[in-house]
Amino acid sequence: MCEKISKVNSWLSEVFGDQPVPHFEVNTRTVDILFQLAQSSEARCRDTALLSEDLKQKASEYQAEGAHIRDVLLQGVGLSCSNVSKPASDYLSALVDNAMVLGVRDTSLGSFMPAVNNLTNELLEEEKSNRRLERELRALRKRLGTTLVLRSNLQEDVNKTIKCQSVESAKAEERMLNMDFVRAKAKELSSRRERAEAQLVSRNMNKSLTHQAIVQLSEEATALKQEINPLKNKLKPYMDLSPSPSLAQVKIEEAKRELAAIDSQLQMNIDLQ
């Protein structure tokens, strides 16, 4: 723990330099976190130092190679920076810039051609990717159009459904009002009927004079008439004959007895009511 704290303090002193180190709570967690940060910072510093040394070495190599090429040009061809024309200097600068952009080691044709081929391949791949993306974009636009049309249709259906629901709701409310009116009217009529029946009972009205009793008597009279009609049909063939007085008397007596029986039954039904 003490070793970690001293390591952290040393690292913080290097980081902040002449500025005072901010106060922080010293506990196991903060010390562990700062210790990890110190180790990561030192590792990155070492990597940066190695990279810097490598770059310095490459720079020295490039300088040595440049000096060698300059000596060759001066000794073999007699060229120098002072006697090179401006267009040639511009061409050389453009060549160097292209070499730096392409990331090649030198400006020879053997270095430029692979780099240009790689760029061409990358360009073809990008164009291929662009065409694929354009196809996907067209498909997405088509699906988007279909989705928008479907959304519009669904919105119209929703609006129609809402309109129909409002109409049905109004009709249902009207029916409820009508039902309430019918219930109130039925309740009123039932109350009036009960009051009328109470008045009739208080006046000792004969039940045979009620509507139900009269309807029942009418039904019974109709049934008796239906029973009399067959008897009349039996007597009809004898109406045009000239029967003997004795036979006619017998038939008349039988008819009188049947009529008397029917009349007595009718009278009994009326008396029972």
Image: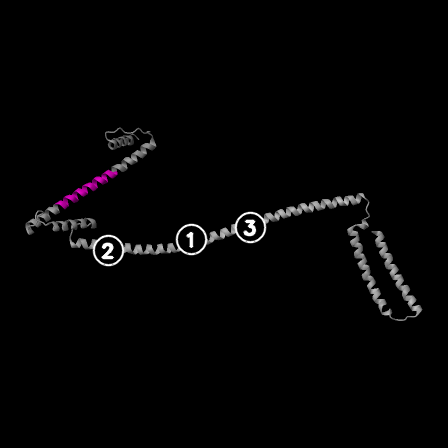
Q: Nearer the viewer, residue 26 or 255?
A: 255
Which residue was labeled with disc 2? Answer: 120
Mark 3, mark 2: which one is toward the viewer? Answer: 3
Q: Identify the residue at the far right of this view.
A: 246
**Which secondary structure class fits the magenta region best?**
helix
Quadrant in which the N terminus appears: top left
Q: Amino acid at mark 3?
A: Val
Residue 227 locus on image (x, y percent) = 82, 62
Q: Is 117 left, or right, of 188 in this rendering?
A: left
The residue shown at (85%, 69%) is 237
**Picture layout, residue 192 above or below residue 225:** above
User: Which x, y percent locates residue 39?
Assistant: 27, 36
- The range drawn in magenta is 43-63
Q: Is residue 62 magenta?
A: yes
Amino acid identity at mark 1: Leu
Front-most of residues 113 and 144: 144
Res. 225 mark: none
The residue drawn where x is 14% and y is 43% is 60
Q: Describe the element under mark 2 as helix, strand or loop.
A: helix
Specify few, some or many for label 2: CA neighbours under 10 Å numbering under 14, 14-19, or 20 or more. few
The quadrant holding residue 143 is: bottom left
Of labels 1 and 3, earlier in sequence is: 1
Q: CA distance from mark 3 to mark 2?
A: 69 Å
* Residue pointed to by mark 3: 167
Indicate which label's residue lies in the foreground, 1 or 3: 3
Residue bearing the label numbered 1:
148
Disc 1 to disc 3, how far (Cα)?
Answer: 28 Å
Quadrant in the picture for residue 24:
top left
Q: Circles 3 and 2: CB distance less than 8 Å?
A: no
